[in-house]
Amino acid sequence: MQPENNPFDSSVGSGKLASPRNIALLFAFIILCGILISTQGVGAGLGLMALPFVWLYLYWLFKNPIVGLYSAIGLGFILLGITRYFKNLGQVGMAMDGILFLTYLAFIFKNFRTKIDWTPAKKDVTVLAAIWLGYAFLQFFNPEVQDRQAWLAGMRGISLYMMLIVPLVLLFVDDMKKLNTFFYVWGIFSILGTMKGIMQLTIGVDPWEKAWLDAGGAVTHIIFGKLRVFSFFSDAAQFGSDQGYTAVVFTIMSFAKENWKKRFFFLTVALLAYFGMFISGTRGAISVPLGGFALYFVLKKNWYVMSTGFILLAVVYIFFKYTTIGQDNQQIRRMRSAFDPNDPSLQVRLANQRKLSTYLASRPFGGGIGHAGVKAQKYLPNAFLSQVATDSWYVLIWAEQGIIGLLLHLFILFYIIIKASYLIMKKIRDPVLKIKMTALVAGMMGIMVASYGNAALGTMPTGPLIYVGMAVMLNAMALDDKIIAEKS
């Protein structure tokens, strides 16, 4: 009878490095990195040094495909801001496509020897995502489309990511632990975003951010000599709107009767997110908590909470609309301008909408995805739509996909909001899950309100977060049934 192997006798960690072969391989790898750095530059050497970490990540991903979903959430926060530091990344957005497709590949390989059960993904939210993506594909044949590359670039953020993310969430996020992990990833990146924003506000921007401001970013990010903080996001508007979204969701989640560590984390994220929203100088961001908490008070179905909540919202509205308190503060002064109907910026937006109304009167399917707004100037510098700022997310959908596309989009959004609200008020039994679903639906409503003034809804990182929220909310009953069964 052979003795059992003692796991402590096996070589692990640094013990494996003691092998002459492994030491030789390590030295060869170091020498190769040195040669590449000296001949091809630092970038090539760093790329080679990153290969072991890439291999470890892929191993982890194919072993646990849900890692890809969490990675996509984190990637959404930093992806657009990376372009300030690396100028030759090409289509940087393709990294999101790549990680999502890799996640599907990992899921298929993990279940290669068994029949994959797609049943969890067969939900109405998946059908809605498929319809929205189908309409986007039909836009490829829109006679107004002048550049297919512009269509491809615009279609991904508007509809493709929704179609890729929703089924993954339905397949992977099937218990409270995985749902909480999603919130932890979200919260950690939000904290990092606020910390970076505080650094910009107190210490100043770094050389790469300064170069970005000098190249044109200062036009919208330095107002009367004051910086609108943008953190590592694409711009201050996206930073402010996303922080407002985070603040609403994590504030409401902190009300759940969970252990103090979770509640402390959620409350910390919320408070920092409010501060991030404030220092961004994004006027439209204030509408996220106003719209989000308005729905939250309704969903509580408690007249005392509802009346108290609406009084508080009224106080906030009166503070910004009818007082001059804090007018010396640049951030307060800028947010207060969002309540001024005569604000010059608002008048410019209304004038642009009148131009679009005339242009789109004979174009019910719009001018083509990727063809409207400043971003379209990369592909169509002289086209009519690329010369008109869209600003609003809904105006962007209307300009690119016409009144038919806008109505379809609004139907999908309100279907999800209304059904999720019904499940919260009538169906969900677990009190903690109910609070978290309420947080998500209130946050989504806040973003929907804010998207009238900013293109917040479909831009990273808010877009991927919203798509995860959509899937989780309409999968609430499956989560609720599992939680109740485990408690029983």
Image (spheres, rainbow, N blue to C red):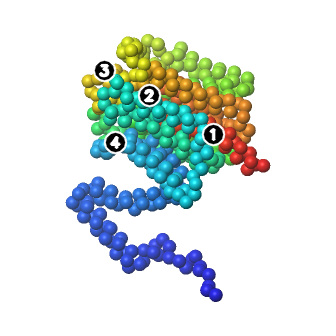
Q: Amino acid at mark 4?
A: Gln
At horizontal 57% and vertical 32% (from top left) the residue drawn is 443
**Could you tell which of marks 2 and 4 lies nearer the N-terminus?**
4
Circle 1 residue: 475
Q: Amino acid at mark 3?
A: Phe
Tell me, for residue 455, which label it has, or none. 2
At horizontal 62% and vertical 81% (from top left) the residue drawn is 4
Tell me, for residue 205, which label it has, or none. none
The one nearer the camera, 363 or 6, is: 363
Circle 4 residue: 91
The secondary element bearing badge 4 is classed as: loop
State which quadrant residue 24 falls in.
bottom left
Residue 93 coordinates in the image, percent (x, y): 38, 41
**Could you tell which of marks 3 and 4 lies nearer the N-terminus?**
4
The relative height of residue 370 versus residue 398 in the rendered view (above or below) is below
Question: Is residue 337 visible in this depiction of the protein?
Answer: yes
Residue 201 coordinates in the image, percent (x, y): 41, 36
Residue 171 coordinates in the image, percent (x, y): 58, 47
